[in-house]
Amino acid sequence: MDRLLFGDNQFFGVNHMSEEKALAQSIRFQDIQAVIDVLDNAYDEGVKSFMCTTHDRIALVADYMRANPARYQDFSFLPCMPYAHKYANAVTEDGMLGALKRFMPDEGLVNAVMRGGMSLAKKDIEGITTVLVDAEMKMFTGLRTPIIFLQNVVVDLLLGLGFKDAFRIFATHVRSRYNAEPGFITMNLPLLLDALEEVGVENPIVCSNINKIGFRMCGGFEAYVRALREKKVRAIAMSVFASGAIAPDEAIEWICQQPNIESIVFGASSRSNIRNTRELVDRYWPSSSLLPAA
Amino acid sequence: MIRLAIVGLGKMGLSHYSIINTHPNIELVAICDSAGYVLDVLNKYTGVRTYTDFDTMLREVALDALIIATPSSIHTKMVKAALDKNLHLFCEKPFCLDTAEGEEITRIANEKGLINQVGYHYRFVGAFQEVKRLLDINAIGEVTHVLAEAYGPVVLKPKGSTWRTQRSEGGGCLYDYAAHPINLVNWYMGAPQRVGGTILNKIFSKDTDDEVCATLYYEGGKSAQISVNWSDESYRKMTTKMTIWGTNGRIYADRQECKVYFRGTACIPQGYEQGWNVRYTTDLTEAVWFYLRGEEYSAQLDYFVRCIEGKCASDNVNSFENAMMTDRVIAMMIADVKGGQKSDAQPEIPKKRTLFFRNR
């Protein structure tokens, strides 16, 4: 896994600090070319993994990468699913069946409906889960997706409900069908690690807020530090700057001192910000495998 | 341990279930919903005890507390039945569509000294709490006007109907969206003397309002303007904003931040300075034990638990009494529209049986 992963919040008007900034970003990235330009900057700075939601607009990025294989030969998508709004909107607009049809994978409608429909009837979430994952993965056909993430609202909802089998089902399907590593995004790292251990998902890739001031580290700062030290986990740190509350230098230095963190996911809108973050990581994680493109 | 059940497993019910199920002081003993399918799946994978009939659950399960997350049109019935069993209650908003009924169950809950809380979660958002703190110390002087806004993308084209799109069930932009900013205005300003200029406008919906405007009048010439629209696609999700003008400055707040401008005339609170001040969610938000969709959802349930443990029924920040103030303002707005447009009659609230009550 790369030391630095590029996130996509900035492209979709998600800003945890300011509605105004979020709006400005929405306007700036309305044209998909503006998104691709920033991804080009990241790629040329050696940040080649793109952790993205399965938003409709990401499909446009995926189309672009597919059309330019030479330029993006080392580019990886790390999809985070499901993009929940998409389902809610589709069901409102097309009803349950219409929505299901719209998201069916290419293996053929009949096949997928059988798998999904039979599962629905048997109240068997295994089949339903796999059909939904396949539907979300459709836009990445032919592209590299080494890690596939289950998004935090779903992970944390299931975690709270105690619906832990779903994590195992997701992990198994992602491994067998996509030859990819399953990843889990959560706002409740310590609790999730216990749950994953319980259902036999070993040494999981887990992406969570990890930052020096403990912002949105639910279960408490101490519990996170302990979990990182004692559990077998491949952690990805997000919100490392706590939405700007920590100075970049201080934030990255602290992250690089924590055990079991393999990667940092960050968002940026300019090449200079991307470069600054990369240089900080190079400085504080000297073994960093990131090298700028020639 | 507090023994708790949840009735109603829609979006809010499932969210409450997930959050409260992880609370260290709660034993979640049963869930109830009229849709058997969701219950069966949850039972199959988590082993939770499930009911499709509310009365049966109340009869068979020993409980201390209940979360009610069903459509508002059946809140009264459920609250009454639960109060009969002496249960502490957390009820979703809007509280009651009929203010007379709401007042009756509020009285019963208070007489029994049972904890009663309604899910106006914005009162647990750090930035909106900071506004309340600043107003309580008169930081911006005498408040003259409030602008309370909420926008989001719920109904974006003419389409089928659910309870959320019917005012008679507690849906519609007025009950679903506008109730939140109105509730915040009440928290900051108290009850208005009267309401005027109410507009409940349909944009795409057939049966209910998508756009809500109104002016609330207070003594001394103070006023508040409500501007709410749930058919606004330019917002990614529901966004609530409060702007408050005072003689010594102005406050702006949304879920992410609280910005305050203090004039030189202000008695400036500690940590603030003359001119612009910005407080971000990172400073204003207290950590929660479990996070699902925002700290406020966890914080309000933790508060409910702590109120039960501390037996402090009378001063809950989101008590039935407080929620009734919001219901009354909503009723005043509906009456204002009726008064202005006699021909445009509002639908009566149907008194119908629901699946939750089989034997009534």
Image (cartoon, grey):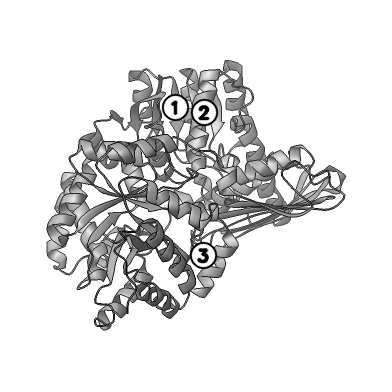
The crowd level at tag 1 (other Cα within 10 Å; few <14, some 14-19, many 20+) is many
The residue to which callout 3 is attached is: B204
3 or 2: mark nearer the eye? 2
Residue A115 position, x and y percent, is 14, 56
Q: Quadrant of the C terminus of chain B?
A: top left
Horizontal arrangement in the rendering, residue A278 relative to residue B177 (left or right): left
Q: Please tell me whether mark 2 sits on a helix, a strand or a loop.
A: helix
The residue to which callout 2 is attached is: B304
3 or 1: mark nearer the eye? 1
Q: Which of the labelled discs sits on residue A109, or is there none?
A: none
3 and 2 marks on the same chain: yes
The crowd level at tag 2 (other Cα within 10 Å; few <14, some 14-19, many 20+) is many
1 or 2: mark nearer the eye? 2
Viewer-closest of B245 and B91: B245
Q: Chain of mark 2?
A: B
Position of B167 relative to B75 (above/below): below
Viewer-closest of B65 and A266: A266
Q: Quadrant of residue B33?
A: top left
Q: Please tell me whether mark 3 sits on a helix, a strand or a loop.
A: loop
